[in-house]
Image (cartoon, helix red, strand yellow):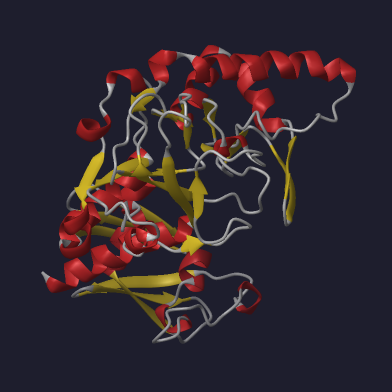
Amino acid sequence: MKAPAVTAVTARPERLTVQWADGTRGEFAAIWLRDNLPENRHHHSGQRLNDVADLPRDSRIRSSSVAGTGLSLAWQDESQVATFALDWLYACATGLPGRPEFHPRRWLQGATLDAKRDFALLSWPAIQSDARARLGWLTRLLQDGLAFLTGVPSIEGTILEAMAFVGRVAETNYGRLFDVRTVAQPENLAFSDLGLGLHADNPYREPVPGFQALHTLVAAPDGGDSLFADGFALAAQLQADDPDSFTLLTRTPVPFRYRGTGADLYAERPLIELSCTGAIAAIAYNNRSIQPLRLPAAECTAFYAAYRRFAELLRDPRFQLSTRLGNGDLAIFDNRRVLHGRTGFASVKHPRHLQGCYLTRDSVCSEAALLRAALAAES
């Protein structure tokens, strides 16, 4: 990001203030500047060479000057002069380089939306050959938490080819991919004909899978519709309507467990997880795998009231996006944000077969960042 011209610089012993022509004002603590000296970064990897314990206990600025594209600082009681790129200081002052995928767009009224009109949609040929279209699609996926591909060949295993353009597939006890179809004795109700309420997958894992993809090989002509809802928007709605219930669901540890052939998985986490800044960071709602809570009897009534209030929001049809995935359609969604479910169907009449896989969250974000940088370098 090219910085505008600097209009004023004020250096005090404990702080540097820089004013730019566009009105941006940056304040930088002396200790922060001392910690971020360019020479303290490895020239190739960019990783830090120093530790906080190596810094002077009392870093103080003596003077500053601007020359060309750099700002030089002299330190009290030191002969060393530090030079910072003004573009870099401007980026730090504005929060840039901001990545659009880190700014989610919430969608509460799911019933008013159309999957193929209101969410990112890309064809199988385009994701393979059009890098700019793929970047737009990835960015929307990360912002909205949900995106679709069409025309993906209805051949077993093709989902792994598709996900090579999206991120890194995470292997679980199901393998790198799993089949979603009806079996006689399902270890997971996903492998039955039953309708499934909105939920997040695998809250009993550490870590919980970041993204999930589902590719339709054989669609059911009657039933089996896919349901999606924005868990962040629903949690925010609960916070607005009933802040006490919201707080309770962010603070109460809930045990989740899955036992099946070759796996016995257990984890505890709140139904609504917050970041260190208090923002809604993840939803871990999965009524099928919740274990008996270990709460004092006096606390159970309040928790169950809050739990029910959230569940009622998830059941409200106004907040559910409903869509029928046809043969060759692929849906991918943020498993820590977008809740998913389905309507029931009759596999005796119409067999239904999807293949799915999980992707690591960081790899999807990384793919978007690397692609954006590559396209910028080309242009």
Q: Position of residue 10 (x, y in %)?
A: 34, 59
Q: On the image, which quarter does residue 199 sit in?
A: top right
Q: Position of residue 221 (x, y in %)?
A: 33, 28
Q: Position of residue 324 (x, y in %)?
A: 32, 30
- Residue at the limit of the structure toward the front, as seen here: 349
Q: Position of residue 110 (x, y in %)?
A: 35, 23
Q: Looking at the image, can residue 14 be seen?
A: no
Residue found 46% across the figure and 72% down from its top: 36
The answer to which of 115 and 195 lies nearer the viewer is 195
Compared to 48, does 140 lie above or below? above
Residue 49 as seen in the image, left or right of residue 111: right
The answer to which of 239 and 28 lies nearer the viewer is 239
Q: On the image, which quarter does residue 145 sit in?
A: top left
The answer to which of 275 and 141 lies nearer the viewer is 141
The answer to which of 310 and 344 lies nearer the viewer is 344
Quarter of the rendering occupied by the C terminus:
bottom left
Quarter of the rendering occupied by the N terminus:
bottom left
Residue found 44% across the figure and 49% down from its top: 355
Q: On the image, which quarter does residue 5 sit in?
A: bottom left
